[in-house]
């Protein structure tokens, strides 16, 4: 797997929200692949960083892929809203979905990639019947919506959960990608890639690092990704 085949998805909520247009231009110049955009309602989590109107306006100013992560108790409403904006990926949470198959079909019929997000402690068995229809699975490695809480650490079973999901995908012959989100850092990226992660959501520990320029962080990020790919090949992992 080449360096560029690992998708880099900066989390927009960690960018400079007061200068969002400039921040996005910097990300474009840095060579990232997508903007990871969290849509959160106050029922799912207390954090509400970005609204639909902001996303609509931003769509006019960048060609980067929009990677939408819905954290809501009303998934269908949010899905319909963002489909009208023009996005490339949408993931919603299994934990708040009574009819996940229906929502996946709603997304895919618009030629948008569909994913399901799982909270850290949610079992991978919830995906058993869904994997064949999913373009990707989003594994949360911290409790969603609490990224600003510095005491919220990446769960100790992060790599193992990624590895187990990769084995499940391989065993069933599916090509589902694995996106990881939550304290994805220079230190944890190599192990996550070696375990099977193919899409990295990058926040305050993986790209928007305090005291560093974006260029400095991107160089460290590229080094971490390359290290993960080398480790993956050394271990003989199949992704």
Image (tube, rainbow, N blue to C red):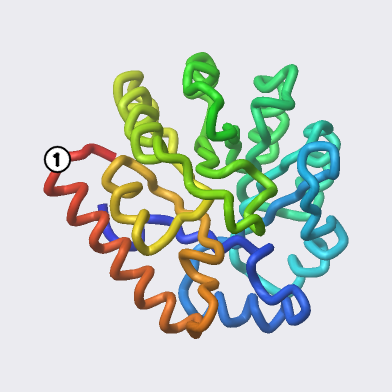
x and y, in percent, of residue 122 in the image: 55, 25
Location of residue 120 (image quadrant): top right
Q: Is residue 127 left or right of residue 3?
A: right
Q: Which residue position holds label 1?
A: 236
Q: Is residue 63 left or right of residue 136?
A: right
x and y, in percent, of residue 163 in the image: 32, 33
Which residue: 26% across, 55% down? 228
Which element type, helix, strand or loop, lies under badge 1?
A: loop
Outermost residue to the front: 151
Quarter placement of the C terminus: top left
x and y, in percent, of residue 206 in the image: 46, 65
Closest to the observer, 98 or 110: 98
- Residue 108, compared with residue 172, is above or below; it is below
Which residue: 35% across, 47% down? 192
Location of residue 106 (image quadrant): top right
Q: Is residue 86 left or right of residue 204?
A: right
Crowd class of label 1 (few under 14; some 14 to 19; many from 20; radius 10 Å): few
- Residue 215, compared with residue 74, is above or below; it is below
Closest to the observer, 145 or 195: 145
x and y, in percent, of residue 96 in the image: 73, 26
Q: Is residue 187 left or right of residue 103?
A: left
């Amino acid at each position: 797997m080449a360096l560029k085949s690992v998708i880099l998805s900066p989390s927009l909520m960690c960018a400079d929200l007061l200068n969002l247009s400039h921040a996005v231009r910097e990300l474009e110049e840095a060579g990232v692949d997508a903007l990871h955009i969290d849509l959160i309602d106050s029922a799912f989590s207390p954090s509400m960083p970005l609204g639909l109107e902001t996303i609509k306006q931003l769509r006019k100013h960048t060609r980067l892929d929009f990677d939408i992560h819905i954290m809501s108790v009303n998934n269908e409403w949010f899905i319909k809203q963002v489909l009208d904006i023009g996005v490339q990926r949408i993931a919603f949470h299994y934990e708040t979905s009574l009819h996940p198959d229906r929502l996946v079909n709603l997304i895919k019929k618009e030629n948008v990639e569909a994913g399901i997000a799982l909270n850290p402690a949610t079992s991978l068995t919830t995906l058993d019947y869904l994997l064949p229809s999913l373009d990707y699975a989003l594994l949360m490695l911290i409790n969603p919506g609490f990224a600003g809480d510095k005491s919220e650490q990446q769960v100790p079973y992060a790599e193992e959960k990624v590895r187990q999901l990769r084995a499940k995908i391989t065993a069933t012959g599916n090509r589902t990608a694995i996106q990881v989100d939550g304290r994805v850092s220079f230190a944890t990226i190599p192990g996550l890639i070696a375990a099977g992660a193919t899409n990295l959501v990058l926040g305050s520990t993986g790209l928007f690092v305090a005291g560093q320029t974006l260029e400095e962080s991107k160089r460290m990020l590229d080094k971490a990704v390359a290290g993960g790919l080398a480790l993956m090949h050394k271990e003989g992992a199949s992704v």
